[in-house]
Image (cartoon, helix red, strand yellow):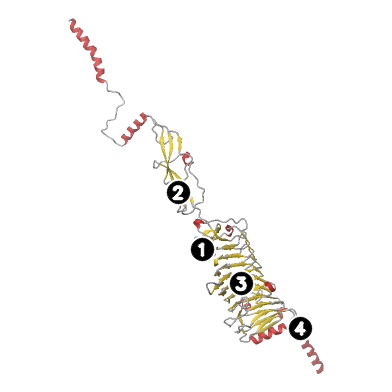
Amino acid sequence: MKRRIFVVCVFVMLLLGVYAVPASADEAIYEASDFVEFKAAVEEINAKTADETYTISLTGDIDFGSAGYNCAFFKNTVILGNGHTINIGSEISNGELRIRNGAVLSLGKNNGSNNENQLKVTVNAPKRSSALLHIGAWEETGILNIYDGVELTGCTTNGSSLGSAVNISNGEFNMYGGDIHGNTNEAVAAMGGAVAGDGRYGKVVFNMYGGSIRDNKTLTNAFGYGGGVFLANAAFNMEGGSIRENIVGKTTDNAQGYGGGVMLYAGEAVLRGGEISNNTSSNFGGGIFTHNGADIVIKTGFSITENSASQGGGLCNNGNSATVEEGAIVANNTAAVKGDDIAHYGNSLTIAPAQSMNMLLSTDHSNHLITGWYLDDPRWQADSAQEIDVTVSLGKVTTFLKAAYGSKYVVTYRFVNDSEGEGLPAEIVALLPADTQEHHVGDTVIPIQPTQLKVAVAGGVWEFKGYDADHKIVEDIITEFVGTWAFKPNKGSLNGTPGTKPKSAAARVEGKEEQLRESGAQNINIPKTGDTTNIKLYSFLFAAPIMILLALFYYRK
């Protein structure tokens, strides 16, 4: 009986043991509280034969110390940080996280909780020869995914490695979130302050869907490329997130810096969403620099703003083609020498009208609506702006552009009557000249004469007397010429307002009398309308016959 009970117990234990084996990738979880446990978990996972996804959940900080451990992942693995740190140690030439054999390494996971995804990957060494993470090798591919909550920070490299945070040799980097910041690549030929890849010996793809690449540096005493991202012979797809506040700087005056945010050497890039902003290059391409046959398309909704360089503050196109589609924003960048927004040295540049950006210009503190693409060599000035026709692509013609506006300096005309307070008839107003010429500050303008210098109207003739100046210098937005007209009545007519019927003499006298009476005038001999000048003559003629009759009567007596 006891033997039977023993056999049954052993059978049950074996049965339970079989069902304790993880049935899915999500159940294959290893916990690690220190470097020893972490290393053991990685080696055990790599020894697995099943192609599943395994999870390492950190319960403490992992410090490689001076072990110089090159931690390679050969199986699909997820690392959940739970708020902890992986420090890959103090060694200069060893110590990194490597993805090989077609494996997928995910730092965090999609829809992971904030604490679950919290992971910092960093290093103690002051300067080292390799990046924090290395994707693939010449004959081996790898894929790296990172999510919100993950930080890659604090690594300074000496140029032996491309990139200081992520080096893509042969594979794919998918950035769904996270923060890559505070990394530096300092070397004679420094390539990629944060993320870099060269696809000459394998496939290199960088897909950025979210997160930020910020505050990274490439420093050089000769040539520096890509303060944030450097990609050669690669594919770059950006659909979200930000690349900002990265720097390509130089430690000597003769050094050259290219691509403060991003440098593309050959290959292609499609930017669909997100922003590249506030990056700085010591020389070319504050936001982006393209070179050696690279093709780039900047689509609706993407933004390249507030970057700075010596030439091409936003974009310096020295590749094959660059296309800026309608609704994409390339504006409010600055260049110390020329090409605030775009410096074009490449084979082709196709850009949509700047009005489609619906942006205000802030670099000149005007907040004026951007109305077009203007030449920025010589430097753009609102009062002398030269607009560039972008309805056709620009070929291999070096061009420097700024998205801005042009002040329209106009010359206007106004007519006045030489009799103060009097208006002008419509026939005169219709003769006002219209100046349609383009004017700039400092131009000398000679006024346009009216098409008629004399205009006959009822009662007289209007004559043009001239303008207030025979020429003027354009100094303000509006330069005005004032022309004077005088009315000359016809001979024999006394007119009031030109074009009205003259009053009769009697009416004028009557009107004058009325004015004097209304004003209370006194002791003024107003001429009478009756004729009194011959009264004495009439009296004499009346009395003469009477005198003759009286004389005859006296004589007869």
Residue 54's spot in the image, x, y percent? 70, 80
Asked if the residues shown at circle 4 and circle 1 are in contact, with their CB atoms under 8 angstroms apart, the answer is no
Amino acid at dot 1: Thr
Give the answer, above or below, for where 12 lies relative to 353: below
User: Which mark is in front, 4 or 1?
Assistant: 1
Name the residue carrying label 4: 19
Q: CA distance from mark 4 to mark 3?
A: 48 Å
Binning the other alpha carbons within 10 Å of mark 3 as few (below 14), some (14 to 19) or many (20 upward) gives: many
Label 1: element kind: loop
**Would you say residue 184 is visible in this rendering?**
no
* Residue 460 in sight from this viewpoint: yes
Contact (Cβ within 8 Å) of mark 4 with mark 3: no
Mark 3 and 2 residues: CB-CB less than 8 Å, in contact? no
Whichever of callouts 1 and 2 sits on the residue coming sooner in the sequence is 1
Instruction: Spot the residue most to the top.
Output: 556
How far apart are labels 1 and 2 at the CA level? Answer: 31 Å
User: CA–CA distance between discs 2 and 4?
Assistant: 95 Å
* Secondary structure at numbered mark 4: helix
- Cα–Cα gap, marks 4 and 1: 67 Å
Q: Which residue is mark 3?
A: 229
* Residue with the mark numbered 1: 363
